[in-house]
């Protein structure tokens, strides 16, 4: 059976107090509606119909895919009306799953349970038991069977006692759904076309209405304001943190990590508090990451140690390397195995050779640094003349004295040495010592100035 998904996303989201359509507000690395689209794809949907009302242009810019069809609901006349906007696209012989653009945390396994619950000639509802059901549509059962849904505002005293609630997520056959939607009326307390009214229609046609349930309430919660959005964010992050721990990573505090994208971790990985991982990151076995690090689209290879407050972006940190505290490793940087950068070292588009070290206060940009090179504190590669970027090449075993300015393009030969405080603008041959600084003069009889 083919499957289409209708995602309702027409609500304006006034309580967000934002120009951005509600469903474009982010949870972790992507908007709420993108999470929902991911779930739709994960259950193998053939088509996704996105029902939008406001900010259509923005939505179309931000949310893309060959399987997506944008369907406008110009006026928000109710959830039934919203789903009906997709009816012209829906095929008779397919199943239709209704999801919500502002309910991003529904697990794929939950949707699969719902899909499995639907019988050939029936429909399926995702329902949840809530301690406080106020505001939700209530599931009305007779002798155990679902016979309808009544909205809070239309419910009588007895129905208000029901705690089994409608999440809004449901699955029905395309032909049935279109027939039921075309028969909806808005004769109710809110004057809306309720999607929920199709349940009584299904029952009166003798359809079997089965239910499935989420593992936790958060899976079916939406965000109407930024407090609820932050709530979803925390729940999402805790879920991610738990996945990492199950996969063998140790988190010093699972409540203090943020994963905005895909993070793969090996065994014996230890991550201290307040680290942020963005994009696609791979962390291999036995890596330790100190507090307050930010890692973006990078690979950290086995045995490396990242000390606190280090920022790594589009870089590769090799086996058994160490970086930080307070290192900034910018795009295009590769640290080869056993190399080390210490505090206040910035690197960009640089290769740090095997076993090379830059312990303190250094900028290495567009540099190729050989094996076991030692870079003294305060070394700067002057890679930019205001117009062009140039390369600095430092060959194996070279020793750069502290506070050097290496004016690129420049090459320092193998085992060469540069004196502290030197400005090096000319190439240095292998094993040479290069010094370029004014000779020290010690003057006798000089007097300090005195106050007049
Ligand atoms: C709906 C259900 C209720 C359920 C609750 C769960 C109906 C009639 N009621 O109520 O049984 O317990 O969700 O949260 O379905 N939307 C549109 N176009 C519209 C109207 C709504 O796209 O014309 C979208 C909204 O943006 C929102 C979603 O549908 O994402 C739900 O709409 P909302 O008005 O919040 O429904 P509830 O009153 O909460
Ligand atoms: Ca709602």
Image (cartoon, rainbow, N blue to C red):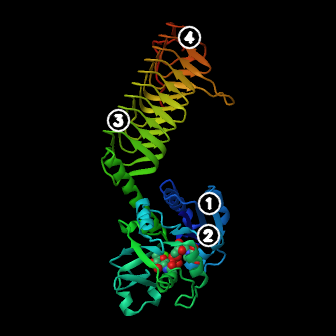
Can you say whether 315 is above or below 148 in the image?
above
Can you say whether 77 is above or below 406 in the image?
below
Q: Name the residue under label 2.
A: 90
Q: Is the residue marked by circle 3 packed among few (<14), some (14-19), or many (20+) residues within 10 Å?
A: many
Q: Is the residue marked by circle 4 packed among few (<14), some (14-19), or many (20+) residues within 10 Å?
A: some
Residue at 43% in and 67% down = 114
Q: Name the residue under label 1.
A: 68
In front: mark 1 or mark 4?
Answer: 1
In the foreground, 63 or 200: 200
Residue at 45% in and 66% down = 115
Label 3 to label 4: alpha-carbon separation: 40 Å
Label 2 to label 3: alpha-carbon separation: 48 Å
For marks 2 and 3, the one nearer the N-term is 2
For marks 4 and 2, the one nearer the N-term is 2
Decide if residue 384 is on the left or right side of residue 300: right
Residue 285 numbered mark, or none: 3
Q: Is the residue marked by circle 1 packed among few (<14), some (14-19), or many (20+) residues within 10 Å?
A: some
What element does badge 1 sit on?
A: strand
In the foreground, 252 or 103: 103
Label 1 to label 4: alpha-carbon separation: 60 Å
For marks 2 and 1, the one nearer the N-term is 1
In the foreground, 381 or 269: 269
Contact (CB < 8 A) between labels 2 and 3?
no
Residue 422 numbered mark, or none: none
- Percent of width and height locating residue 196: 50, 81
- Percent of width and height locating residue 443: 47, 13
Contact (CB < 8 A) between labels 1 and 4?
no
């Amino acid at each position: 059976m083919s499957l289409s998904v209708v995602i309702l996303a027409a609500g304006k989201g006034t309580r967000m107090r934002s120009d951005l359509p509600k469903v474009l507000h982010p949870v972790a690395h992507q908007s709420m509606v993108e999470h929902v689209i991911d779930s739709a794809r994960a259950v193998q949907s053939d088509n996704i119909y996105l029902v939008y009302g406001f900010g259509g242009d923005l939505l179309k810019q931000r949310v893309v895919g060959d399987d997506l069809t944008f369907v406008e609901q110009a006026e928000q006349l109710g959830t039934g009306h919203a789903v009906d906007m997709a009816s012209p696209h829906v095929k008779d012989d397919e199943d239709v799953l209704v999801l919500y653009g502002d309910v991003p945390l529904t697990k794929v396994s939950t949707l699969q349970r719902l899909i499995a619950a639907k019988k050939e000639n029936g429909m399926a509802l995702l329902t949840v038991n809530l301690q406080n059901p106020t505001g939700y549509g209530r599931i009305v059962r007779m002798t155990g069977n679902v016979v309808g849904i009544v909205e809070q505002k239309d419910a009588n005293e007895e129905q208000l006692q029901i705690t089994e609630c409608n999440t809004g997520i449901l699955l029905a056959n395309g032909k049935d759904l279109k027939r039921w939607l075309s028969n909806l009326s808005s004769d109710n307390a809110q004057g809306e076309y309720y999607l929920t009214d199709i349940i009584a229609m299904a029952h009166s046609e003798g359809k079997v209405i089965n239910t499935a349930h989420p593992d936790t309430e958060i899976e079916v919660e939406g965000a109407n304001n930024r407090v609820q959005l932050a709530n979803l964010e925390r729940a999402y992050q805790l879920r991610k943190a738990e996945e990492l721990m199950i996969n063998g990573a140790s988190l010093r505090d699972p409540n203090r990590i943020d994963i905005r994208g895909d993070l793969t971790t090996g065994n014996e990985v230890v991550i201290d508090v307040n680290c942020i991982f963005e994009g696609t990151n791979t962390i291999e076995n036995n890596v330790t990451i100190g507090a307050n690090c930010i890692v973006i689209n990078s690979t950290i290879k086995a045995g490396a140690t990242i000390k606190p407050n280090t920022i790594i972006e589009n870089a590769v940190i090799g086996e058994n390397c160490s970086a930080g505290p307070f290192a900034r490793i910018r795009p295009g940087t590769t640290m080869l195995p056993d190399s080390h950068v210490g505090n206040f070292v910035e690197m960009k588009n640089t290769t740090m050779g095997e076993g090379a070290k830059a312990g303190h206060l250094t900028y290495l940009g567009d540099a190729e640094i050989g094996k076991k090179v030692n870079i003294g504190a305060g070394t700067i590669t002057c890679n930019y003349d205001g117009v062009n970027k140039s390369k600095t090449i430092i060959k194996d075993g070279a020793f750069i004295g502290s506070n050097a300015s290496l004016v690129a393009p420049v090459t320092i030969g193998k085992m060469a040495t540069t004196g502290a405080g030197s400005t090096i603008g000319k190439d240095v041959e292998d094993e040479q010592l290069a010094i370029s600084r004014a000779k020290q003069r010690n003057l006798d009889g000089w007097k300090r100035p005195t106050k007049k």
